[in-house]
Amino acid sequence: MKFDTLASLQSNACRNFADNALFGTYNSDTTAFEWMDYKSFDDKVALARGILKDLGIGKYDKVGIISNNRWEWAATAAAAYSLNATLVPMYEAQLPKDWTYILNDSQCFALMCATQDVYDRVMTETIDSVPSLSKESVLCFDASNGEDYSFSAAMVRATPLSNKLLKSEAPIPDDLANLIYTSGTTGVPKGVELTHNNTVSNIIGVRSMVDDPLDFIRQTDVSLAFLPWAHSYGQTCELWCGMAHGSSIGICRGVPSILEDLQLVKPTVLFSVPTLYKKVYDGVNNIIATTNPIRRGLMSKAIELGKAHAQARSSNKSLGFFATKKI
């Protein structure tokens, strides 16, 4: 699949992998993950594009988003890219003063808020200090359909805009895709400009590491997204690289739910950072050290078996029954 911008990546992926599952979201009523396929996501991007158009967003405008990972985040990003607008991602955990600074520094003309709490804090502590934003240009993902500021209600009102109708507004590789702000530990947050080519070249670069691009991520692979897409690592490696290969992404509910979500999603690919692996390692060793001798022995044998299996697989060999008995 060929692409040179994040807009063409999303559009081509949704066409090529239409029936594949893309995003999985936890449903508290069924206590299971429900999956949206690529075609359905493309339809939602068309509606999100209509929302941004209704808000007056066009070329080179900035669209802010204060949200953890969710399909609406990805739909807003893809819609903005296709209009040659720039996404300005922020974190729910940030303070309103941080949002205010970033929104003013980037000159955002629209803002998407994840929760009612985030929306309320924006309305009471931020928006009056951001001249570029109007109250009508701030929407909330979690708001009920009865509210004027509801994202889902705006989706119902919006006219779907196909990518094919917007060729004149399509970005080129050197256009600005993301404006990602630093944490501000050395002063005020600094906006880092990332073009479409910055991200796309990384995805293509990853493909060059293997003889067959499908050896890196397969269509049948499933990941669990807990790294924030507001950060370039999570967004590049998991969201866009995963989408470029037709894989599926279960959206983690948050760090406290990682263990349960791992069991529900059963990922075959996991993008992480050393801190998480250290926590898992320390947790397992703590259990081994404090459990009864029988269980300790079984867990130690299981770890040895896992190491042997990994070594055999890396050598394209079968572990075999007798090898497991020795362990």
Image: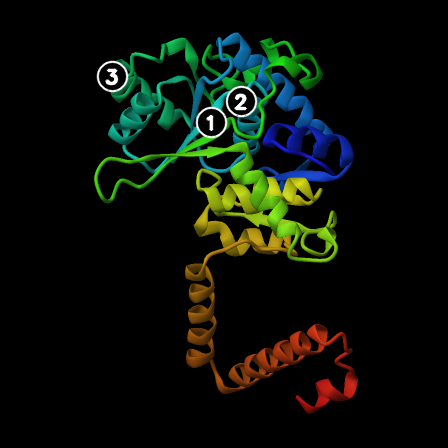
Give the class, few, some or many, for how many residues have Cα within 10 Å of label 2's Cα (few <14, many ≥20). Answer: many
Query: Residue 190 sits in which quadrant?
Result: top left
Q: CA distance from mark 3 to mark 2?
A: 24 Å
Whether pointer 1 and pointer 3 mark residues with C-beta atoms closer than 8 Å, the reply is no
Residue holding disc 2: 80
Which residue is at a point 64% across and 23% down the rendered structure image? 44
Please state the horizontal and vertical placement of residue 290, each as a whole percent of the image.
42, 79
* Residue at x-position 46% and y-position 31%: 178
Image-based side of 221 in relation to 5, left or right: right
Q: Position of residue 156 (x, y in %)?
A: 61, 13
Could one spot residue 114 in this view of the protein? no
The reply to whether residue 304 is visible in this rendering is: yes
Residue 245 relative to residue 87: left or right: right
**Colouring used for the render:** rainbow
Do the residues bearing badges 3 and 2 touch, measured as CB atoms within 8 Å? Answer: no
Looking at the picture, which amino acid does disc 1 mark?
Leu
Q: Which mark is residue 129?
A: 3
Q: In the rendered view, would you say 194 is above or below 233?
A: above
Between the residue at mark 1 and the residue at mark 3, the CA separation in whole angstroms equals 20 Å
- Upstream in the sequence, badge 2 or badge 1? 2
Mark seen at residue 87: 1
Residue in front for this viewpoint, 193 or 42: 193
Q: Which of disc 2 and disc 3 is earlier in sequence?
A: 2
Res. 236 mark = none
Q: Regarding mark 3 in the picture, which secondary structure is present there?
A: helix
Judged left or right of residue 3, residue 55 is left
